[in-house]
Amino acid sequence: MQANRLLDWLGLIALVIMFGSAFLLTKIAVQEIPPLLVVAGRIVIGALILIAISIAQRERFRDLLPYWPLLLLLALTGNCLPFFVITWGQQYVDSGLAGILMAMMPLTTVVLAHFFIRGEHITRNKVIGFLLGFIGVIILMQPDLMLSSKMNWIQIIAMLSILSGAVSYAVNSILAHSLPKISLSLISSGVLIMASLMIVPIALIQGTEEWLPNTSFASLTSVLLLGLFPSGLATIIYFRVIRHAGPAFLSQINYLIPVWAVLMGVVFGGEHLTFHVLLALVVILAGIWIAQHNRKAVEATESLYH
């Protein structure tokens, strides 16, 4: 029993490290590689890993055929769209700020669950939690929202872009409640196959001739790591933890991932932790805690940082 509990904690820590580090890896990659190609690269690498696992487990891909419309929606809302808008935004926003903005995902899910999941209703705690999260975002954006002639519109748009990624993940988590009762690793493979089929043709139109010859080892390695870990290996660990420890245990990563993203940005990315960033982090995490304080809501707010 203790061994299983230890494995649960190790899995949780691994998820925090992999999901939280994705923001810094993305920041490194987009310095030299166009966002669309970063997204396509990580999706294809993640898909290849999950396909190999499904084949090793002798799973039948034809079992996915009846569910292709759902898989298409999951791929769009959980991979293609959020990956792109977050990656694009990180050209202009620090990785730590991106991690904090993404913490709005579980709070947005609370609101959407009220309308689309039976038995999930807005409560006082959820309203307070969402409002605190919104205030935290305003605090985070406040330096760029000051009324002056030097208003940094590109950073404002970039932060709103990343927030739209959080909303997309929230929609994805609502759709995930309709998953068929078949192998989760097979479903994950199907979702990334669909995502690859959507994003690769678009990425190929953009071409690779202009950037590939001069791309650094660090940028290429970042894309490889994004595919191997946050998009591939993390999916397996994610499902293992949620099956053995449950969504309540897993929901703790909603607090830990933004903190890890900020630490990675400061320690390894040379980013600066200002007072308003720290205050925004505390306010948003407090909002998540209040909104999820009622245990019944956690299943609708489990994290999907991938």
Image (tube, rainbow, N blue to C red):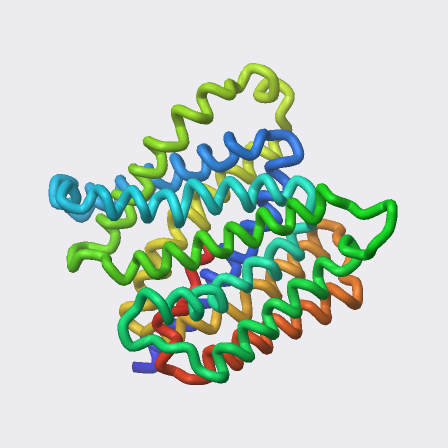
**Percent coordinates x, y for residue 16 in the rendering:** 50, 62
Q: Pick the residue in front: 104 or 13.
A: 104
Residue 2 visible somewhere in the drawing? yes
Find residue 178 and report its image quarter: bottom left
Quarter of the image with the N terminus is bottom left
Q: What x and y, as percent, mark residue 141? A: 71, 58
Pick the residue in front: 190 or 112.
Answer: 112
**Numbered circles on residues, count:** 0
Name the residue rendered at 30%, 68% in the picture: 117
Residue at position x 43%, y 72% in the image:
251
Q: Residue at 45% across / 43% down in the picture?
A: 81
Is 49 left, or right, of 126 in this rendering? left
- Residue at x 60%, y 37% (from the top left corner): 29
Q: Horizontally, is 1 left or right of 98 in the view?
A: left
Q: Position of residue 153 (x, y in %)?
A: 74, 44
Q: Left or right of 148: which side holds 197?
A: left
Q: Residue furthest top?
A: 209
Image quadrant in which you'd find residue 211: top right
Picture coordinates of residue 25 (x, y %)?
58, 45
Is residue 11 among the parts visible in the rendering? Answer: no
Above or below residue 66? Residue 7 is below
In the displayed structure, does residue 122 sit left or right of residue 197?
right
